[in-house]
Image: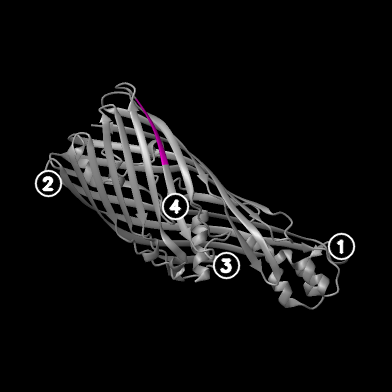
Amino acid sequence: MKRTVCLLGILALLTASASAGILTNNNQSATFIRLLSRNASLDVDAVYYNPAGLVKLSDGFHLSLHNQIINQDKKINNGFPLLNEPNYLGEVRVPFFPNLYAVYKKGNLAISFGLGPNAGGGTADFKTGLPSFEIPFSTLPVMLTDMGLPTTDYDINIAFKGKSVFMGYQLNFSYALSPSLALGVGARLIQATNKYEGSITDVMTNPGGTWVSAYDFFMSIGQPGYAAMVADKAVNAKQTGTGFTPILSLCFTPGESLAFSLKYEFNTKLELNNKTTVDDTGLFPDGEKFRNDIPAILSAGLRYAFTPSFRSFLSFSYYFDKNANWEGAETLVNKNTYELGLGLEYDLSSQVTLSAGYLRTQYDLAPEYQDDINHELTCDSVGGGLKLNLTNKLSLELGALYVFYNKYEKQDTFYPFPAYPVIFNRTTLNVAVGINYRF
């Protein structure tokens, strides 16, 4: 199970979502970025957030295209006393995070299509690796000194880079049973691809004060087992898989000022298959398959207009992490993840709308789940932006958000050394633009 947790964590490392369950991106439009609460959307991004609500659109064809630019720094401070440097940084840069929505509405029926990265969507670059990779090598000076070879230092080059995209293709049918009640049924096809490249090279140490290759040194003293442990290592692997998500939704609009929504996304059974060309770590055996489900999601939303120009949005999303199949890693989830969002928007004029939002993302995971490869941080997000109605058919949306993470600190161990502190933290900045057009 620990190996599975590691693989799930590598995916988490590659995810720079502004809002997410453990494996799910919920930031699926520029409108979301500027409001942070879209579960009761009656606009085109309801294709993802509230499919039943699409029956409230005007008759005709609606098209919406969004992109987000996400910058995230994943920070780790590791207090293991033998490391040369306690601070590690993973840079996730996502210049292209697209969403496309298309809706045809006629009378009581709406047919819609959407696509976007439902998980992953980022490339993570850990230029100096991770402490869990380096700690075993940092003990070389102690080991050699205990062997009677006074050694004071070590050096190593570690790099890890990965890319992950779980692209979703969604089709919905929505129907108004009455002026106030609509139902939606849909499905999403998930095509998952992970790519990993990494290396551990040039392990050096200085027995007797002279720098030498650790591999060459161990071979010279007749220790081929130790030499194999410090030999150069590399990884080049790809994982692929396909899943299917049924989606049910309901929208209740008793009046012009009030809308209530419910949506349930079923658990996505997802099996990934390793296609490995190089694996000196043993993490990615070629041809191995393992479950990496996307958990079921229950979401509810409330939209209330205080006046025709001033609207509020409340959203709640609940991720059934404990019911997913992660090859046993789901047992390290203490409580399922949830999100609570609040958004406000105000029409300054018929051309300009201002908006702001707040989102709380709450995780509850066992300490065994949280390590440098695999950790999630409870966070608070604030966002804002505007919508510009350029014509009666064309609008432009701009949004930005910043995420404030709760630091997570724990005591870790590496036998036979005493316990040491580890601190995880992050920063995320997201900017987004969206274009909506009605034919």
Q: Where is residue 207 in the image (x, y as percent from the top left)?
A: 84, 66
First reached walking from the N terminus: tag 1 or tag 2: 2
Residue 396 falls left or right of residue 154: left
Classify residue 385 by image quadrant.
top left
Query: Marks 1/4: CA distance?
Result: 51 Å
Give the SS element for disc 2. Answer: loop
* Residue, disc 1: 210
Which-is-in-front pick, marks 1 and 2? 2
* Residue, disc 4: 362
The three-letter code of the residue at mark 2 reads Leu
Q: Quadrant of the C terminus?
A: top left
Q: What stretch is highlighted in magenta?
A: 353-358
* Residue, disc 3: 279
Give the SS element for disc 3. Answer: strand
First reached walking from the N terminus: tag 2 or tag 4: 2
First reached walking from the N terminus: tag 1 or tag 4: 1
